[in-house]
Amino acid sequence: MKKRIGILLSGRGSNFEAIARNVASGVIDAEIAVVISNRPEARGLETARKLGLTAVSLPSKGLDREVYDRMVVAELKKHQVDLVCLAGYMRLLSAYFVREYHMRILNIHPALLPSFPGLDAQHQAIEHGVKLSGCTVHFVDENLDAGPILVQTTVPVLNDDNADTLSARILEQEHRIYTEAINIVLSGKYHIDGRRVVLD
Ligand code: GAR
């Protein structure tokens, strides 16, 4: 049976679209079981509906973190999700959520972690004056942008870059490495040694 992916997003959803394209073409051998957003107005939810996928709006506003995460986990379990992919999901997960899907939650971040975690990573990179930035796909733990790293790639920062031009160049690479990371996890050909993800 194909593995079932659950996508969590909060906005535009271009990483989700790249994953959906690769699922549709067979590059990723899995199915997207459900797309959930904490923001009802997220463009990614609309895209999911247009693609004929199950799209669920679960507004998080005003809810305690764990109370909300229990609702999300219940929805993921209802759809028998094996692997959770955060795709521009702008919320920290509770210990409860991380426990329920231990080492089965991935996130993509637009910087070379551990540099520039949190919001506006591309802006942080420009402000700091780094010559190289990039993106990272990692397993999710309770800390912000901090779990074991699966795949990273670098992107040069050019003299005339601003946060928007750098973001666009990083985004192209995000779309590529998220699929690469998902395929590593689906293959099961890796093990985790401390913080290191080692490919078998
Ligand atoms: C992406 O650049 C992703 O790496 C970033 O949000 C953007 C979402 O774009 N995520 C984070 O910063 C998480 N800390 P998308 O909605 O078009 O995929």
Image (cartoon, rainbow, N blue to C red):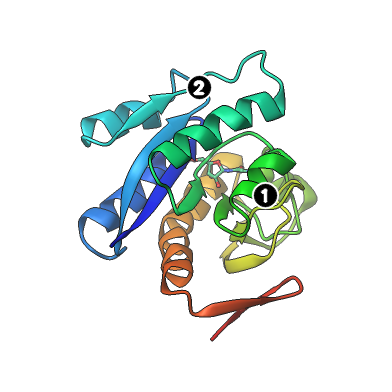
In which quadrant of this rendering is ligand 1 seen? Answer: top right
The type of residue carrying mark 2 is Arg
User: Quick check: can you spot residue 157?
Assistant: no
The type of residue carrying mark 1 is Arg
Q: Earlier in the sequence, mark 1 or mark 2?
A: 2
Q: Quadrant of residue 112 in the image? A: bottom right
| Vertical arrangement, residue 75 with respect to residue 61, above or below | below
| Residue that mark 1 sits on | 99
For this orientation, the residue located farthest to the top is: 62
* Residue at the spot 46% in from the left edge and 33% down from the top edge: 75
* Residue at the spot 61% in from the left edge and 34% down from the top edge: 90
Q: Nearer the viewer, mark 1 or mark 2?
A: 1
Position of 44 compared to 128: left or right?
A: left
Q: Quadrant of residue 127 in the image? A: top right
| Vertical arrangement, residue 179 with respect to residue 116, above or below | below
Local secondary structure at mark 1: helix
Q: Position of residue 8 (x, y in %)?
A: 49, 38
Q: Quadrant of residue 104 in the image? A: bottom right
| Residue that mark 2 sits on | 39
Alpha carbon distance from label 1 to label 2: 24 Å
Q: Nearer the viewer, residue 152 or 71?
A: 71
| Vertical arrangement, residue 16 with respect to residue 139, above or below | above
| Vertical arrangement, residue 101 with respect to residue 200, above or below | above
Q: Position of residue 38 (x, y in %)?
A: 53, 25
Q: Position of residue 1 (x, y in %)?
A: 28, 62
